[in-house]
Amino acid sequence: MKLASSKLCFLVASAAVFFTGCPKRPARPTPMDTGVIGQGVGPSTRGAEVIPTIPPEPGLIERGDGFGPDNQNRTALGGSSVYFDLDQSAIKQSEREKLKTAKAYLDTHPGERLLLEGHCDWRGSAEYNLGLGDRRAAAAKKYLLSLGVPADRLETLSKGNLDAKTNADAATMEKDRRVDLVVTRAK
């Protein structure tokens, strides 16, 4: 008899838990309940819900000048790239004007630097292309130094064939053999 009554008690307790369920979550407060809305922190328009404007934190840099979160501006020089012939790192005469334009830009923007990013097409080993990308970036740096750009305003980086399109056609490969001129902020 004791066994049957304990089973009955267990069934009644289980049913009570099942039918009552878990406690309900409290409702989230609306912006009107928090006291944030209506205290003059954001723009106001009649008849519309007001969404607060949060001022920027101190020390954050406004990014409206073309600089991305990586502190780079790839459009300042019109997205310029210096192009190279296959397996070459010598700067062609036709590409030197781009580097002269970059020097003129740096002369008028003393708080900025130039990152010279070397690239290769997909052919060749990754190690070889990293070396070739480095030689191309170094050649662009050497030319800018000869124009009078201070060394502390220039930085080189080889990406090798990381951004190259594999099995690309000849026209695409020509575009992959380059040094990108990327403006950065001085440190």
Image: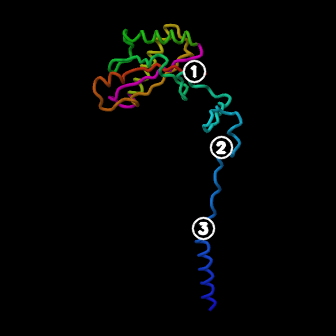
Magenta highlight on residue 66:
no
* Residue closest to the far front: 47
**Residue segment shown in magenta:** 110-128
- Label 2 environment density (alpha carbons within 10 Å; few <14, some 14–19, many ≥20): some
The residue wearing badge 1 is: 185
Q: Nearer the viewer, mark 1 or mark 2?
A: 2
Viewer-proximal residue among 25 and 171: 25
Q: Secondary structure at mark 2?
A: helix
Task: Identify residue type, mark 2.
Answer: Pro
Q: Indicate the position of residue 152 as horizontal and vertical percent values.
A: 57, 16
Which comes before the other along the chain, label 1 or label 2? Answer: 2
Give the labeled residue for mark 3. 21
Cα distance in 3D space between marks 3 and 2: 30 Å
Q: Quadrant of residue 164?
A: top left
Front of the two marks 3 and 1: 3
| Secondary structure found at label 3 | loop
Can you identify the residue that label 2 sits on?
31
In this picture, is 21 found above or below 30? below
- In x, y percent, where is residue 76? 49, 18
State which quadrant residue 120 falls in.
top left
